[in-house]
Image (cartoon, rainbow, N blue to C red):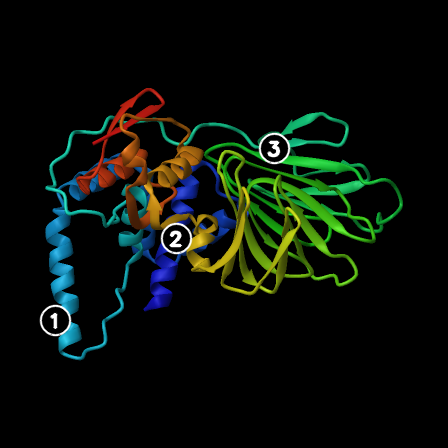
Amino acid sequence: MMRDNRIGFRIAKLLARQRAGQITDEEVRELEAWKGKSPENEELFLRWQKGDFFSGEYAKYKEIDVSRAKDIMQKRIDRERRAGWRLRVLRISVTAAVVLLAVGSFYFFKGEGDGKRDTVPSIALISAQRPTLKLNDGSVVLLDSVAAGFKEEGVTVSKTGESTLAYLAGDTLDKRALAYNTLSVPKGAEFDLVLADGTQVWLNAESKLKYPVAFGSRERVVELEGEGFFKVSKDASRPFRVKTKSQVVEVLGTEFNVDAYPDEGYVYTTLVEGKVKVDAEGKSLELVPGMQSVVGGQEMYSRKVNTGDVVSWKNGMFVLEDKSLEEIMSKLARWYDFNIFYQNQVVKEITFKGKIPRYASFESILDILERTGEVKFKVSGQTVTVYQ
């Protein structure tokens, strides 16, 4: 059953990426293979292409009484626990997963609310900004206009999908001074990268990565601003380092996430697999899988986290565990590109739990936040005013 759930949400993500114009060639083939497996899949695919699919499903969703649904679910859970039954795993169809992803049909838990709310005006979806690549000579290339492959300082750069670049260095090591590229991902976008050593990097919205087109023989160093997930190719003779404004992460071969947005007070490094050392302001921490370092000001400490939640952005979700409204709105602003104004500063500290599909409509997200009864929103152009 869990496999069915994963398949459902995987296809839902592909359909959402297709609508957002961010689907890769490989993902198109995967989607086509799924579509050809049954008439039901074909029918769902065709429904997804129609604009009234969203409005119809969202209209149904808005009629849901959140408080009543939560009460019914809690009573069912309590009843099954008292009876000593194992709680059944929900089996989600692809259709249900698509609806969940399309209209943001998920719950936030903070207060019961009365189910009454003002109508939230529509806001433009993901902005049509374009990822760019700054070459070693200072020129800037729009990545959506790049052909299948090109040469950069003697290194072959292959565009393997709509949002993926791969560097093939060959035998260029140590033969010349390092040449650098800088990949910039705007708000409302994401991009994948395969570095010359085989290291894979996933960059989140509003992020930059500066890296050599081919690494030298002694070390591998990249510079990050924003958020990136790294799957480092093992090479004991050349340690891999990720530099941010306030810290350096050193690894040999591992998987980890670095959240280092310049407008936030802290840098978060989360280890998924392997081992890393985090250096900052003369202090250092070693992390084991499942641990996260927090660096900011004079503070530096580690804590245990759910790594799946932290890296959920890479899989098309925002997972929020006891996040403040200010943190939530900051994350959303990088994806939907809007300005935030708080009429009352106290609301910034209200905390929520929940899951947000990255491709859900902005209207549906604000609507669900309002259903908690804790906050209200007013949208004017690209500015969102938050009040109680």
Position of 6 with respect to 119 (left or right) is right
Residue at label 3?
143
- Mark 3 and mark 2 lie on one chain; the one further toward the N terminus is 2
Q: Is residue 76 above or below residue 167?
A: below
Disc 3 and disc 1: Cα gap in Å?
Answer: 55 Å
User: Mark 2 Cα within 10 Å, few/some/many (few <14, many 20+)?
Assistant: many
User: Mark 1 Cα within 10 Å, few/some/many (few <14, many 20+)?
Assistant: few
Disc 1 and disc 2: Cα gap in Å?
Answer: 33 Å
Residue 347: quadrant of the picture: top left
Position of 75 with respect to 357 (left or right) is left
Position of 67 with respect to 309 (left or right) is left
Q: Secondary structure at mark 1?
A: helix
Q: Is residue 104 above or below residue 206?
A: below
Q: Is residue 286 visible?
A: yes
Q: Secondary structure at mark 3?
A: helix
Disc 3 and disc 2: Cα gap in Å?
Answer: 26 Å
User: Mark 3 Cα within 10 Å, few/some/many (few <14, many 20+)?
Assistant: many
Looking at the rendered structure, the kind of residue marked 2 is Ile
Residue 16: quadrant of the picture: top left
Q: Are marks 3 and 2 in contact (CB under 8 Å)?
A: no
Residue at label 2?
11
- Mark 1 and mark 2 lie on one chain; the one further toward the N terminus is 2
- Mark 3 and mark 1 lie on one chain; the one further toward the N terminus is 1
